[in-house]
Image (tube, helix red, strand yellow):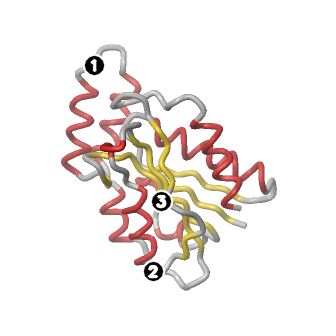
Amino acid sequence: MHTVIVYESMYGNTREIAEAIAEGVHQADPAARVDCLPVTEAGAEVTRTADLLVVGGPTHMRGMSSGVSRHMAASAESHKEGHEDAAAEARESAGGPGLRSWFHHLPETESGTHAAAFDTRGATAGSGGAAKGIAQRLSHHHYDMVAEPEGFIVDGVDGPLHAGELDRARAWGAALV
């Protein structure tokens, strides 16, 4: 089985969740081939070979990020002292394509190719979530969803991840297999 996990991450939280999902897939199927890639490295040649495509991103303004929201997040992060690594990741992410534009280039697939969607989001109900929009776009490309869209909680605006979320992501990844 070949699993491809594609993620967009501004502050590193979504990347950490994606990596934990990859660990969960490996725990459930040690022989599985797993590629865990930022959206900037996930071209059609990689996604086309997936038996399972898992896609995730941060929640911005109650939904999927946009070019404007990514630039706003990168700008805010660059003004924080002691956050040099996060600021570098935010700038890199803001400068490249986000999930919205990535979906424009995702080839449609045949029925029987599986997918799942996740996001990182705030703890309050008003935070919204990006996973549902991601799942809808995957369905429009004819992917068969194998799980309900999942949200992983971030404390504060830019993290860290809420206690226990990495373990929950590992378990969710294992359950996808």
Outermost residue toward the front? Answer: 125
Q: In the rendered image, which residue does mark 1 sit on?
A: 80
Among the two numbered marks 2 and 3 on one chain, the one whose residue lies closer to the N terminus: 3
> Does 124 appear above or below 108?
above
Among the two numbered marks 1 and 2 on one chain, the one whose residue lies closer to the N terminus: 1
Quadrant in the picture for residue 17: top right
For discs 2 and 3, the disc positioned in front in the rendered view: 2
Position in image of residue 68 (x %, y %): 18, 48
> Does 142 appear above or below 104?
below
What residue appears at the point 64 percent right and 51 percent down from the top-left corner? Answer: 172
Q: In the rendered image, which residue does mark 3 sit on?
A: 42
Q: Are marks 1 and 2 in contact (CB under 8 Å)?
A: no
How many marks the image carries: the answer is: 3
Tell me the amino acid under the disc marked 3. Answer: Ala
Determine whether the residue tagged by mark 3 lies in a helix, strand or loop.
loop
Determine whether the residue tagged by mark 2 lies in a helix, strand or loop.
loop
Position in image of residue 69 (x %, y %): 23, 45
Q: Are marks 2 and 3 in contact (CB under 8 Å)?
A: no
Task: Please state which of residues 151 and 92 is positioned toward the viewer in this rendering.
Answer: 151
Tell me the amino acid under the disc marked 1. Answer: Lys
What residue appears at the point 32 percent right and 54 percent down from the top-left corner? Answer: 64
Tell me the amino acid under the disc marked 2. Answer: Glu
Q: Residues within 10 Å of mark 2 (few under 14, many from 20)?
A: some
Residue 108: assigned label: 2
Q: Seen in the image, is 175 located left or right of residue 98?
A: right
How far apart are labels 1 and 2 at the CA level? Answer: 41 Å
Image quarter in which the N terminus is found: bottom right
Position in image of residue 83 (x %, y %): 36, 20
